[in-house]
């Protein structure tokens, strides 16, 4: 857990932006650990992630907003400050396929994912034993066409009570309502088992098998109101051949989904993602 | 150039198929070099590629059809015989982007592609110097909305005169008419610069850039009457990031297109591809 | 679990081999599911894997050796028969790093690895809770320089009692003695966390970090008397950059090790591996 | 061709480094296009690449060294300034295998490699026709054990006369003398057709084939006095199987070598490489 501060900035590009940010940190005796910026040339847009060591930093971090606001206003910045020591509070949603869940729990346990996982929500009991193994509360919220609004209310309450920062849909097979999504803008990550935008919607492996593609994919993306259309965070592919049955596709898909989803979650909780024009900028 | 025979077979699966084929070759003292078969389990279908050494083979290969027909009929086979020593006659179609053309010519020259390239057809003069360098006739056939039928007639005549077996669309930017395609069923290979079925049609790199994907692709496929919908032969992807401009996508795409297209052409001319249910089986 | 028989054959190449095998199966009314053969051209060597459906097969499989021996002798075959329905008995050895162990247990549980895992042996207690979760006996056998011969005796006894067919060293940090290895020829698979033959021996990630490579690797191989020198079964690589610390290498390595090792184990228990000249032939 | 300035810096890490550089550029009204820095944490070392637009920059770039020196001295910087508009002068050395040469010439022609190629040097006449096609002088300098010192003198003279900045060994099969190398420190890039440090020295594909690896590699590196030991710039791998003959390895290797070498050359001429502890930092 690093005792660092992370500043995420986006604004119109202008001379002096890097200098203004670097000077601010330096004036308060912060040592910059990473300074990464990206410019969307054709649109004159500037995006940056700056991380500095808080050891020796002379400004009370609670006072940061007040002190930084004049600079932010001068440059018309949208900005956000995060602490390297803060552990995001992540809720995992799962249905019956448990490979992504098991993988995320393992990575959290071994320190790869520096977050808390205060609860798991599922519409089935199947994955409960994994939650038990890790000592994480497992809430079964059955969802049907009829009870969906109430079910989502129940879920939202659980999330609120647990002060959740990020929802991970780890092969959760229910479509969330627009209303639900609105409560967690850019805070819901889904794994879709295809190379989006190919094979949107249900049964992408079946679609891939029918079409006879030579590579199958997986895509982690933020959830928005339009199905499988949110900003893409990470993608992966695996080679298949005519020897692979539909079941082989499913198996090869699992390995990819695990890696792609866990990478997306990690970038999110480490504050490495900026959103721009329905796309993500990843400051690795 | 191998002095071998290649038998491609597809038929309903039945006991004794492998034995019947292997026996036939053995009875005439052929030594099998490769025996590869694939079964589409759920459909009860059998596909095979058998290659044997013609040195010492006691049957006049011209007499093969007559001798093999009883077996073929017994098992209801669709079959095709090819000679390893035959060099396919390939026509390359190109427009302005010449990277695939240059690559194919280089591979043909160094022996990777064991084929003849008797002519190149283009709607532009740009790539002519590469044809000249390799001493290959280059025919400029301009295509407009108005003259398209006549232009295609001219192309078909050139192809016929040169006894072409395979047409390779190496970034040829004109859509071929259904009528043209009918003359060369499963004998036209196209390279599309996306990961099909994502980004069908025009400007796939622009579409990919707008959607914010993290991998771009290339697809080699047989051309059918429906645009970008024919059986996929090979696909590849390359990783991109937010740092890549649209121009970078185009450059990264080029490397992939070269590799993917040349692999597809090679498998075709080496008689390694069988078609089944709008899919390809590749006997590598 | 398939009710099939798998015949693995290697011998000098000769006319009629495919026919002899296919005929034998056909005579007893077996339906061949997969017939794959490979010839090492320059050496005149033939290797094959033939799998056929036992439903309707008219030969008592226990009588197979007696019936097949004349053919085998005629062609000078080394051969082995396996049953698709047999579940290999696999022992996993592990030390403190548990990612490969956890992965293998998960895959066995979900059916990807069709084997039994009757026991886990470790020189540490750390991974015991995973064994307990899956209800698998976990034997702690501490190993020191002094007690090594006795420790290995104890291990061998456990293996014998459990009728183990395959030993998987899932990041087991002790070097096995030549004597131990002799008991399980071509039955011990190790995962080495480098791209062999680069970075043999201890701390390969440190070596890779020092050398400044741009890709790190993992290698699954059979264990022989010479350290990290046995026949390679599978390899994988992952891209790294200057941004990656030594710890990042370790993390990226884990994902690869899991995939590479599990693939090797799967091929072994599905009887897809033939050994030839210190190399493996994988009939995928 | 960008009208930009690129500053490359390495020095001990200290508070205020980013601010000092960004301020300097800003004071002279430069607009920073890319600011990338990397810290080697455990060693307290700082490396950076800063690129800014020269349009509107108020400092005569020839006066940059004088103005920047006080800052550089304060922070104990090693630094180098390059102009985005400068086209490096690259000499290509080649023997008989011409695939890398042909590829580099093609990429230079289409604008991917923004450099001049004033000459090609070879110990054989074979590749001359490619030089002629592109109108580039081709110097044949035969090298034998006996004449090597004189041959290298002749090469050095050609390089000097052509004011060469970078030498690319595009499958040049002669080992350069330590004396030769000393004239071009960190200015000679070689492509080795293996995944270094595996298979150092002669005939790496033969070595890979014998060892039975499942992936083959290619490595672009700076040439130093120790054979195949210089800082690695880029690496790639390709999957092979038992079906691949030695010749197939060579063919699969070619595709990789092209991509890996051209990438390394591009990063070098775009001033994206910093050297540190026999490793490269690539500011992509």
Image: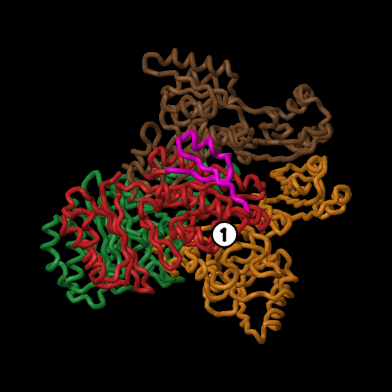
Chain colours: A brown, B green, C red, D orange
Residue C158 versus residue C199 in the image, above or below: above
Which one is nearer the viewer's eye here, C229 or A262?
C229
The residue drawn where x is 65% and y is 45% is C247
| Image mark count | 1
- A104 and D162: which is toward the camera: A104
Left-right relation of D187 to B248: right
Quarter of the image where the N terminus of chain C is located: top left
Q: Secondary structure at mark 1?
A: helix
Give the magenta-colored segment's residue range: C118-144
Q: Position of residue C200 (x, y in %)?
A: 59, 60
Seen in the image, is D76 located left or right of residue C155? Answer: right
- Asked if residue B248 is positioned above or below residue A48 in the image, the reply reads below
- Residue drawn where x is 69% and y is 80% of the image: D154
The chain carrying label 1 is D
For the question of whether residue D264 can be seen, the reply is: yes
Q: Where is residue D35 shown, x and y percent of the image?
A: 71, 44
Q: Is residue C137 magenta?
A: yes
Q: Quadrant of the C terminus of chain C?
A: bottom left
Q: Position of residue B171 (x, y in %)?
A: 42, 54
In this image, C143 relative to B21: left or right? right
Q: Badge 1 is on which residue?
A: D260
* Quadrant in which residue C203 is drawn: bottom right
């Amino acid at each position: 857990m690093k005792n660092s501060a992370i500043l995420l900035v986006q604004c119109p590009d202008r001379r002096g932006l890097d200098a203004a940010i670097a000077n601010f940190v330096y004036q308060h005796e912060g040592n910059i650990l990473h300074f990464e910026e990206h410019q969307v040339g054709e649109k004159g847009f500037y995006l940056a992630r700056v991380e500095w060591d808080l050891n020796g930093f002379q400004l009370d971090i609670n006072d940061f907003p007040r002190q930084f606001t004049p600079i932010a206003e001068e440059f018309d910045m949208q900005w956000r400050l995060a602490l390297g020591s803060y552990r995001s509070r992540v809720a995992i949603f799962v249905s019956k396929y448990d490979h992504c869940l098991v993988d995320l729990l393992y990575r959290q346990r071994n320190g790869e994912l520096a977050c808390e996982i205060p609860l798991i929500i599922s519409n089935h009991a199947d994955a409960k034993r994994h939650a038990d193994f890790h000592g994480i509360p497992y809430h079964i919220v059955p969802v049907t066409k009829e009870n969906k609004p109430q079910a989502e209310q129940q879920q939202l309450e659980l999330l609120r009570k647990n002060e959740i920062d990020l929802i991970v849909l780890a092969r959760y097979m229910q479509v969330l309502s627009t209303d639900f999504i609105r409560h967690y803008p850019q805070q819901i990550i889904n794994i879709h088992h295809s190379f989006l935008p190919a094979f949107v919607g249900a049964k992408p492996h079946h679609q891939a098998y029918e079409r006879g593609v030579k590579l199958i994919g997986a895509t982690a993306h933020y959830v928005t109101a339009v199905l499988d259309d949110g900003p893409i965070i990470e993608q992966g592919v695996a080679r298949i051949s005519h020897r692979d049955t539909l079941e082989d596709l499913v198996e090869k898909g699992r390995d990819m989904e695990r890696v792609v989803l866990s990478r997306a979650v990690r970038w999110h909780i480490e504050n490495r993602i900026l959103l721009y024009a329905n796309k993500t900028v990843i400051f690795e």
